[in-house]
């Protein structure tokens, strides 16, 4: 908010001397609040646009049957509430009249009523949770479909926007955003139904109240209804005035909690580097700073809860007594029975609960608003990426299937998302089976060019013609999935799709033979067990097992020593002699395994390809030399 005010002041310019600076700041603050409110409304609209798809197309008949079931159960529960209210009247009338048979009758019918209440409550809980579960299941699948399509989960890290911590938004905010609306809908429906039914009870039982004023009589029809309404307005109005800041406070608290968890996640993911650098003190300072924000937000929320608790407890203490005091004159005068007094008191409490339901649930409404807006922010960012994919603009690289040849770049420029060029006007053709090495100084955009070829970097212009089938990308830091080492070798295929003998042979050939006995060990720590070099060996095992036609290597041997690099590159050439290899690297030894070298050179308007050199002679000598060398299987850990 403060940043927005400063930005607006800069936009407006210096305030004239005769202007009231306080009034100008207040106006800017109001504009900021209005814009924040509009943003919240837009995000809530985006959430409902996605979430209501469960009833429009996703859940089908099941969604509507569950909805109707919840409504019917709520109506049955309302009927049981009314019957219990009538039971209070009959029971207390029998006690007042010392009617033993009447007391026995009311006692007998009480237990079936309670049994019915329990059964209906259990059924309502089952129907409510089933509806929430099915809704969450559908919405979770809907969000994941958008998130995992066309590499958007990766592209979100490259573009600005309010979509940090997407894993928390999908796992936690999505859960809260579907649980709360179901409970709110049931609560509002029950509250409205209860208010209508029991206001009628108060009207007919209370009748009119006659108050003598001198020689005249003031008659107030439905005085219990009027009293219930006035009491509810005072209690609920006080609660609204106190709790109106809950939404902002709750949003701030949730964001602070998410940021705090993210600091822990970063610490865990980069634990090795932090430990080697001895950065515990600095990391602790960052954690303390993040937790200080959490503590501050919790204190703000605590003060809101304290104020609402004061009003709520005062209201709950007065509500049962007020109807008895109002009915006491009529009971003493003999125009109202004790049963009617107790029935009126029970109905009065139910009406108060109905009136106060929204106010008492205001904090949960604030939590839901924050969660729904956070989920919608992620959806908005995904929408922006999807629109960029569909719109024909010059800001997107066009990728098409290649009819002939392995790769063709036509006037390709790779840009950042802000439009600044990283690689400019690249125009090359790579034929099937070529082994191409891309070199250049650090920062010239080699890895960015590789990502663009792989389809992960969409920003820029020009065309990329490539064979989509059989394309395999080997990043510098290979991904190690959860589960067994066999699954890691077969990834992204299922372990069942890869022959066991092939897996074992390949694992041994790439120098990971010392892990053969642990191939089916199901552990979540393989990412931490394997060293950097072993992870790159694992990546070679994947490519050798799956035998793709086109292999794109981005510093895929950077963590290996020269003998290890030689061993794996030779193995790759021997096992996949017809594969097209496009690799990025700095080591001059890599030239021996390639037939062509492209040189990127940094320029002010973006890096350009300045050299296209043939390496046939070098490659031929190296291939003949490597064919004469005995195959070395190293099991040492790199």
Image (cartoon, rainbow, N blue to C red):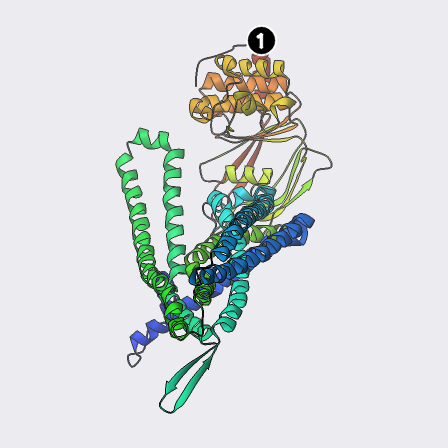
Q: Circle 1: is it few (<14), some (14-19), or many (20+) Cα within 10 Å?
A: few
The image quarter containing residue 595 is: top right
In the rendered image of this protein, does residue 228 appear above or below residue 76? below
Instruction: Write down the residue under mark 1.
Output: 628
Quadrant the N terminus occupies: bottom left
Residue 290 relative to residue 614: left or right: left
In the rendered image of this protein, does residue 287 appear above or below residue 633? below
Which residue is pictured at 50% across the width and 73% down the height? 203
Residue 347 relative to residue 280: left or right: right
Residue 559 relative to residue 508: left or right: left
Helix or strand or loop: what does disc 1 sit on?
Answer: helix
Q: Nearer the viewer, residue 257 or 154?
A: 257
Is residue 534 visible in the rendered image? The answer is yes
Q: How far across and how far down the image is residue 519, in percent?
A: 53, 17
The image quarter containing residue 230 is: bottom left
Q: Nearer the viewer, residue 428 or 312?
A: 312
Q: How far across and how far down the image is residue 259, in percent?
A: 38, 46
Q: Nearer the viewer, residue 536 or 604?
A: 536
Which residue is pictured at 39% across the width and 70% down the height? 30
Q: How far across and how far down the image is residue 603, in percent?
A: 48, 45
Quadrant the C terminus occupies: top left
């Amino acid at each position: 908010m403060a940043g927005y005010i400063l930005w607006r002041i800069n936009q407006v310019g210096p305030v004239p001397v005769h202007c009231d600076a306080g009034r100008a700041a207040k106006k800017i603050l109001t504009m900021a609040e209005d814009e924040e409110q509009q943003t919240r409304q837009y995000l809530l609209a985006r959430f409902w646009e996605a979430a209501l798809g469960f009833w429009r197309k996703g859940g089908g008949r099941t969604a509507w049957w569950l909805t109707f079931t919840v409504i019917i159960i709520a109506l049955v529960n309302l009927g049981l509430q009314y019957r219990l209210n009538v039971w209070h009247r009959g029971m207390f009338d029998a006690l007042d009249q010392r009617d033993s048979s009447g007391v026995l009758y009311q006692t007998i019918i009480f237990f079936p009523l309670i049994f019915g209440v329990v059964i209906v409550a259990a059924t309502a809980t089952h129907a409510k949770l089933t509806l929430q579960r099915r809704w969450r299941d559908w919405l979770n699948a809907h969000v994941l479909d958008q998130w995992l399509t066309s590499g958007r989960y990766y592209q979100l890290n490259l573009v600005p926007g309010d979509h940090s911590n997407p894993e928390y938004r999908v796992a936690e905010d999505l859960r809260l955003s579907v649980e709360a609306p179901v409970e709110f809908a049931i609560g509002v429906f029950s509250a409205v139904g209860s208010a209508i039914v029991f206001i009628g009870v108060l009207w007919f039982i209370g009748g009119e109240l006659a108050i003598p004023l001198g020689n005249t009589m003031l008659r107030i029809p439905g005085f219990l209804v009027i009293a219930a309404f006035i009491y509810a307005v005072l209690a609920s109005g006080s609660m609204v005035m106190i709790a109106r800041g809950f939404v902002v406070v709750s949003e701030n608290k949730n964001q602070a909690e998410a940021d705090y968890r993210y600091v822990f996640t970063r610490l865990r993911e980069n634990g090795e580097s932090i430990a080697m650098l001895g950065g515990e003190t600095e990391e602790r300072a960052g954690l303390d700073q993040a937790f200080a924000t959490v503590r501050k937000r919790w204190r703000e929320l605590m003060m809101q809860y304290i104020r609402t608790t004061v009003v709520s407890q005062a209201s709950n203490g007065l509500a049962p007594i007020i109807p008895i005091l109002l009915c006491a004159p009529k009971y003493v005068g003999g125009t109202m029975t004790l049963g009617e007094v107790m029935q009126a008191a029970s109905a009065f409490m139910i009406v108060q609960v109905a009136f106060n339901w929204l106010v008492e649930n205001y904090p949960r409404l604030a939590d839901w608003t924050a969660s729904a807006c956070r989920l919608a922010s992620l959806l908005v960012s995904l929408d922006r990426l999807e629109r960029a994919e569909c719109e024909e603009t010059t800001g997107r690289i066009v990728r098409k299937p290649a009819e002939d040849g392995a790769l063709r770049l036509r006037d390709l420029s790779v840009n950042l998302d802000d439009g600044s060029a990283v690689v400019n006007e690249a125009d090359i053709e790579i034929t099937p089976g070529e082994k191409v090495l891309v070199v250049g100084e650090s920062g010239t955009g080699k890895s960015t060019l590789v990502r663009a070829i792989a389809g992960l970097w969409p920003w820029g212009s020009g065309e990329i013609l490539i064979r989509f089938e059989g394309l395999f990308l080997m990043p510098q830091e290979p991904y190690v999935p959860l589960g067994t080492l066999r699954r890691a070798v077969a990834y992204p295929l299922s372990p069942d799709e890869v022959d066991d003998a092939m897996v074992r042979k390949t694992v041994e050939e790439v120098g990971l033979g010392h892990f053969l006995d642990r191939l089916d060990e199901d552990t979540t720590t393989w990412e931490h067990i394997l060293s950097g070099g072993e992870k790159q060996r694992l990546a070679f095992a994947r490519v050798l097992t799956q035998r793709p036609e086109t292999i794109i290597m981005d510093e895929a041997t950077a963590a290996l020593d020269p003998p290890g690099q030689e061993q794996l590159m030779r193995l790759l050439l021997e096992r996949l002699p017809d594969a097209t290899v496009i690799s990025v690297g700095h080591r001059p030894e890599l030239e021996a395994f390639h037939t062509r070298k492209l040189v990127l050179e940094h320029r002010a308007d973006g890096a350009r390809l300045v050299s296209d050199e043939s390496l046939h002679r070098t490659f031929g000598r190296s291939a003949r030399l490597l064919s004469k060398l005995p195959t070395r299987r190293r099991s040492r850990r790199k």
